[in-house]
Image (cartoon, rainbow, N blue to C red):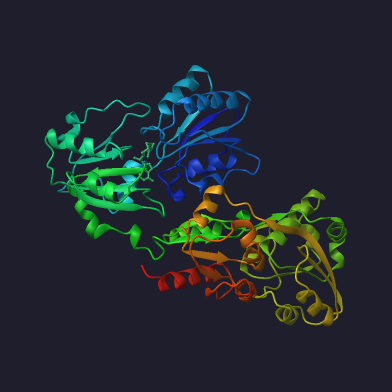
Amino acid sequence: MTAAAGTVYLVGAGPGDPGLITVRGLELLRTCDVVLYDRLVAAELLAEVKADAEKIFVGKTPGQTHSRQLVSDALLVSKASEGKSVVRLKGGDPFVFGRGAEEAALLRASSIPFEIVPGVTSATAVPAYAGIPVTHRGLSASFVVLTAREEGGDADPDVSKLSVGAETLVLLMGVAALEKIARRLVESGRDPREPAATIEWGTTGKQKVVVGKLDTIAEKAAASGIRPPATTIVGPVVSLRDSLRWFEDRPLFGRTVAVTRPPQGSRELTTRLVQLGADVVSLPLIDIAEPDSWAAADEALAKLSDYSWVVFASMHAVARTFARLRSLDLDARAFAHTKIACVGERTRHELAHHGLSADLVPERFTGAEMVAGLGDGPGTVLFPRVQDGPPEPVSALTEHGWQVDDVAVYSNIPGKPDASNLQRWADGDVDIVTFTSASTVTNLGAVAGHPGSSPLVVCIGPSTERAAREAGLDVAAVAEPHDTGGLVAAVLHAARSMQS
Ligand code: SAH
């Protein structure tokens, strides 16, 4: 379902793992005009919105006053009144300590249509990712979710009435008050020796779990430096973690991996690393921009049928060529009389996305492989690619009798990582850094500066490796084959060589 004009959708984003948003929530996010989001919402989800959608942060950071709620309320009403489709993206489920109902009431009072898209709440999902079910036959037939602090206020909720009413207790928002709450629970009848666990940043690569007893958990959590967001679970089900833990056992769990690809092309790599348990830091060292001039490309695209071959050497070359074709009022039919070569699987995928299959897919971007595939000329080859790309593939083709039109369809510019991710790099909070082209390596110093520690270096292929060595870096692993799958395997290899 697509987001409708003038409507507000209160959407649950899930507890942290971006894969835990609902199908409906994701569809709305991908089609809305405006998204208003909170602090705990995964960055990967925000990357799903349309390029021209407005993304507005309206969350509170801990300790802040209420003013942001007012800003958020005003924006909800004004954006929807302008006829925009608005997604109000909230952590977990919007109706579980999420103020969703207050916002819905405000929208009703303003006669703005709204829909609620429930989410996976941290109350059950965070314990689940720690291997703790909230109910279990024979151990717990009930669970209560309570807050250790009332949202927006300092009032103490009365825990005594709940303390003995359910086998499992789930406490949200309670890091600072944990000691007081635990004491009250004991005073009102809970067994101080009952198992308890506190889980920080559950369902994400930063997940940290501390296990203790009701009377020790606050102290243990403090000693381990647990900070919000954290969820505490109390009850006999906590003991199941010993046999059911799974999330932390994945091979890259506890490893922080930097991805330096431009944001447009990093989704597959990021997703695969996250699925293996890594905490991925997006550190784009290059970005894709317009070429200095479109003149040569436009001239070539207008006479595509004159070429024997078109050679695409990267997914960006394909994406940019098709975007340009569209702006010239042309489409895939322009390739009807031309054979197409794609270097590598990602490039082939991007081409398939535009409805075309490649006639030739050389694995590597070397002159020799290109020539082996295309054979000898004569004939003309169109090579739409990065501005100022390396000369070798062109000269190899020329030497074999081809006339090559080497035209720029994009240029590489330095990337712009988020300040918080640059800080993590500077703090030495990156274990492994992946380089996916020589230009990611050469831009490293200028864009990100020196790392606070020496992360292991993983490269996608030989020319990237060469650039890394020339920059004085030790290379821990090189992808084989030189694609995303190979790179992920190389990261796993590097991770295994680290001490735990
Ligand atoms: N509506 C949300 C809860 C909002 S209250 C939901 O349904 O999940 C915010 C509290 O949720 C945090 O203080 C913390 O206790 C808990 N929480 C949210 N995300 C969490 C996470 N990734 N790990 C642990 N606790 C989390």
User: Residue 358, percent across and down?
Assistant: 69, 68
Asked whether residue 136 is in view, the answer is no
Which residue sits at x=65%, y=62%?
A: 443
Q: Residue furthest top?
A: 109
**On-image quarter of the C terminus:** bottom left
Which residue sits at x=13%, y=34%?
A: 187
**On-image quarter of the N terminus:** top right
Asked whether residue 231 is in view, the answer is yes
**In the depicted view, which residue is nearer to us: 241 or 282?**
282
User: Residue 50, percent across and down?
Assistant: 62, 43
Name the side, left or right, on which 188 lies relative to 53: left
User: Residue 78, percent across and down?
Assistant: 59, 24
**33 up-or-down from 368: above or below:** above
Name the side, left or right, on which 99 lies relative to 368: left
Occupied quadrant, residue 244 = bottom left
User: Residue 386, percent across and down?
Assistant: 75, 63
Which residue sits at x=76%, y=78%?
A: 374
Which residue sits at x=74%, y=78%?
A: 367
**In the depicted view, which residue is nearer to us: 498 or 358?**
498
**In the depicted view, which residue is nearer to us: 465 or 288?**
465
Occupied quadrant, residue 79 = top right
**225 up-or-down from 270: above or below:** above
